[in-house]
Image (spheres, coloured by chain):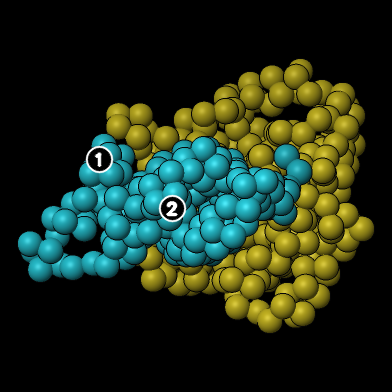
Chain colours: A yellow, B cyan
Amino acid sequence: MGRKEDLYPGFRKENVNSMNTTKATPILVVENIYKAYGKTEILKGVSFTVNKGETKVIIGPSGAGKSTLLKCINQLIIPDKGRVFLNGEEVLHSHSQINRFRQKIGMVFQNFYLFDHITALENVEVALLKVKKMKRPEAREKALKELARVGMKDKAHLYPAELSGGQAQRVSIARALAMDPEVMLFDEPTSALDPELTGEVLEVMKDLAKEGVTMVVVTHEMGFASSVADEVIFMEEGKILESGPPIQIFFHPQEERTKKFLSRISELYGELNRNG
Amino acid sequence: MDSLLFIYQELLPELGKGLIITLKLILFSVPFGLLTGILVAIGRVYGNYLLSSLSRLYVIFFKGCPLLLLLFIIYFGLPSLGVIFSPFGASVLGFILCNGAYTSEYIRGAIQSVKTGQMIAAQALGMTKWQAVFYIILPQAFRRALPGVGNEIIYLIKYSSLAYMLTCIELTGAGKIIAARSFRFTETFTVVGIIYLLMVYVATRILQWAEKKFSYPT
């Protein structure tokens, strides 16, 4: 046991209780999502609920369907079956509806996907101007505020190609935050980064969790998961195998497959994973 | 001395009139050719089956038709269907259709080279597909297509001389008429050639400026 606690130095014991103490207001409800490509079933009925201010971390081996699940939430991938509710309203993928929902569901991608032809500032601004139809001075002010929030205000004038991976990812977080989303989805936000750059991105995400931003995070950063998550969801082969507070998932996993996955991860990342 | 006198007193004033027509042909054809190219490329990549097929047919037809023949069809052929153009109008229409077909191919290639993540990120922010195309994809694609599109504009400057075949007396046509009248073929066509060279030079510089203006760090 002692050895394991060494692995997760940032572990917050109070996480165990926080779920019971906070008043649970469901923001995002995911109900029985199925998705198949041809005969390959990616998601086989996934359901979970995210309450306001909560951070959910989804872990699991690659190919488990974690990224597909996130993309089904904002209908970048349209699920075959199942429903998603945001603030009690069903997220529909019809043209007239979906863009309204997507504004409220921020998404951060593994490869940042910053718009290459415009500066960091303009990246944050563009959706405020074109989607939210803000006036330019107002949009600029908001964009600078969000860049400051991720510590990128002094790099606002740089183009994506001039930023390091960590900086680019922080700008992409600011871009999503600027829309004032109800929930933020992170799809392996540090997986494309050099190890020494993951820290700055995880720091920003930790701050957001502290500020009470509602987040769903797919990640392999177990240190982050153990210190920030209110609940950890373990997925494999398109299903949720088990979920619970981090202390339970990391120290007392019920499922054999969860145990196997965690021991494999700690072998792989082990001592490196001290960002938590 | 005699030649210089001829050039100054007779040739240049006459060529000047033709040059103005040539410049008008170019200035009308380039923007609309570009616009056609952009719209056809967008239709081909992002349009539904019908729009995409129509765009493809357009490109096949106008790339496959010799420009001179196209001009003849518009000017001499269409009147039998009751559609009548002036020589200038027929020329401009022909140039736009031809230039648009080639330009669309450059822009289509450039659109397809923009990484798919750009569209996904734009849609995740709540942009519609068309907002993403106009604000995110096209600006990047246009930058990449610019060298090819610029080449087409330079071709257009030179093939504008085909308007002469429809009795639209532009630079080459004006030169031909003076040469035939004065029998000074060498001087006339040399000067005409130099004027085309200058036009192409100016266009090249403008395009270089545009490439620089639209460039961004990659």
Could you tell me residue A13's position as x and y percent? 84, 48
Q: In this view, does B105 lie above or below A84?
A: above
Q: What residue type is labelled 2?
A: Ile
For the point 12% across and 63% down, the residue is B79
- Rendered image: mark on residue B65: 1
Question: Mark 2 or mark 1, which has the lower sequence index?
Answer: 1
Q: Which chain does the numbered disc 1 sit on?
A: B
Residue that badge 2 annotates: B178
Camera-nearest residue between A225 and B80:
B80
Q: Which chain does the numbered disc 2 sit on?
A: B
Farthest residue in the front direction?
B2
| Residue A114 makes an appearance in the image | no
Q: Is residue B33 left or right of residue B3?
A: left
Q: Is residue A47 above or below residue A50?
A: above
> Which of the 4 image quadrants contains residue A27?
bottom right
Q: In this view, does B195 lie above or below B28?
A: above
Callouts 2 and 1 in the same chain: yes
